[in-house]
Image: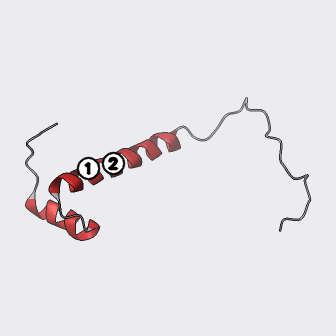
């Protein structure tokens, strides 16, 4: 999809220096992918990693066995 955007020149140049990505389209794609990854991680963290009704997971090694 072709889109016209107004992007601050200094912001674009800073992103180019930090990433080494020279092509504008590739730079915008990388930025969007990074934004999606960050926000997905935030949503996952907000879930609190809590599932009180979850049954204990069976371990492969018996408790107290030495690890290698």
Q: Nearer the viewer, residue 28 or 54?
A: 28
Give residue 32's position: percent from left, percent from top.
28, 47
Image-based side of 25 in relation to 19, left or right: left
Q: Residues within 10 Å of mark 1 (few under 14, many from 20)?
A: few
Instruction: Tell me the quarter of the picture where residue 3 sits.
Output: top left
Write down the residue under mark 1: 29
Marks 2/1 in contact by CB < 8 Å: the verdict is yes
Seen at 40% across and 47% down, the residue is 37
Write down the residue under mark 2: 33
Q: Nearer the viewer, residue 51 or 34?
A: 34
Q: Quadrant of the C terminus?
A: bottom right
Circle 1 sits in a helix, a strand or a loop, which is it? helix
Kindly identify which numbered label has been placed on residue 15: none
Q: Measured along the vertical axis of the image, is residue 50 above or below residue 14?
A: above
The answer for how far apart the CA atoms under marks 2 and 1 are is: 6 Å
Seen at 54% across and 37% down, the residue is 47
Q: Measured along the vertical axis of the image, is residue 66 above or below residue 3?
A: below
Q: Nearer the viewer, residue 46 or 41?
A: 41
Q: Measured along the vertical axis of the image, is residue 51 above or below residue 26?
A: above
């Amino acid at each position: 999809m072709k889109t016209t955007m107004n992007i601050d020149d200094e912001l674009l140049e800073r992103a180019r220096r930090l990433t080494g990505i020279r092509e504008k389209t590739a730079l915008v794609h990388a930025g969007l992918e990074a934004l999606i990854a960050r926000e997905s991680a935030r949503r996952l963290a907000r879930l609190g990693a809590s599932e009180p009704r979850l049954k204990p997971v069976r371990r492969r090694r018996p408790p107290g066995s030495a690890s290698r």
